[in-house]
Amino acid sequence: MNQYIDSSAKLGENVVIGYNSVILAGVEIDDDCLIGNNVVIHPGSQIGKACRIDDGVIIGKKPLSSPRSIFKVPSDLKPAIIGDFCQIGANVVIYCQCTIGQRNLIADMATIRENVLIGDLNIVGRNVAIENFVTIGSRNKFETNSYITAYSSVGDYCFVAPCTATSNDNYMARDKERFNHFKGITMEDGSRIGVAATILPGKTIHSDGVVAAGAVVTRDVPAKTIVAGNPAKPFREVPDSQLMENNLDK
């Protein structure tokens, strides 16, 4: 079979690796993993047991840096870590210094940048982009084409609908003052964002807060409140039947 596995890589029992895949120095792959065709796993990356990694995936990629980039790439980035029982779809790119917990589903063409920490049992949908310096808890859903900007924080049991856009720069790349104010969004536990909503930099969606479809959030969203419109304003309270406390066992 046409594949490259570095002599220093450590493969567990019952690991299957497809055609043209490249496993580089120091990689560790635990038992019962299925690695597809044309997969590249960069040096030192760690793959937990019983993971499925589909065709064309890249794990542990180092970021690029333009001469115009605001932040330069450190030389000491650590390898990527993928937890047990994860499923990673085709053509996903996961950067180095990214830690992903157990039983996550990362769908086709998603991108997860460096310095990202993800908990357990999340669903990251098709073509979702999670930028650098993002922290994500457990049991969240990020639907197709949603975008989570750098320097954001997401709690547990959150929902992000398709085509959601988030931002972290109120100065839109002009005026050096922007360097002092970069801040992504914060989603507290149980918060939800509707389809094609836009969340402006530094805004917090408090616990069980809901952003309606197409809304533009220019202020923090109160807990247990639905906001709608442009700019988004309180519309009504979240129904009791929709509150996180009444749905955790469902």
Image (tube, grey):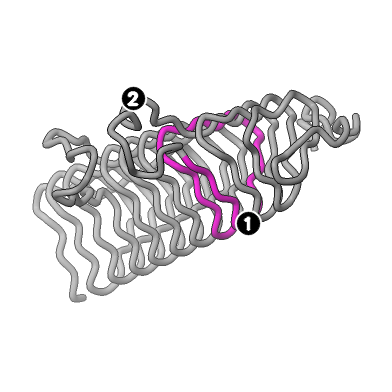
In which quadrant is the C terminus drawn? top right
Query: Is 64 situated left or right of 125 in this image?
Result: left
Range shown magenta: 144-167
Q: Mark number for residue 162?
A: 1
As drawn, 34 above or below 132: below
Depth check: 97 or 237 in front?
Answer: 237
As for residue 156 lying within the magenta part, the answer is yes
Labels in figure, total: 2
Query: Is 71 situated left or right of 250 in this image?
Result: left
Give the Cα distance between marks 1 and 2: 31 Å
Q: Residue at x 12, y 49 (%)?
A: 25
Q: Residue at x 35, y 46 (%)?
A: 113
The image shows residue 111 at horizontal and vertical percentages of 40, 54
As for residue 48 lying within the magenta part, the answer is no
**Mark 1 or 2, closer to the camera:** 2
At label 1, which amino acid type do we have?
A: Pro
Q: Quadrant of residue 182?
A: top left
Q: Quadrant of residue 97?
A: top left
Farthest right residue in view: 240
Q: Residue at x 14, y 33 (%)?
A: 76
Magenta region's main secondary structure? loop
Element type at marker 1?
loop
The image shows residue 175 at horizontal and vertical percentages of 31, 36
Q: Residue at x 60, y 51 (%)?
A: 164
As drawn, 32 above or below 77: below
Q: Mark number for residue 180?
A: 2
Q: Earlier in the sequence, mark 1 or mark 2?
A: 1
As drawn, 250 above or below 214: above
At label 2, which amino acid type do we have?
A: Asn
The image shows residue 224 at horizontal and vertical percentages of 79, 27
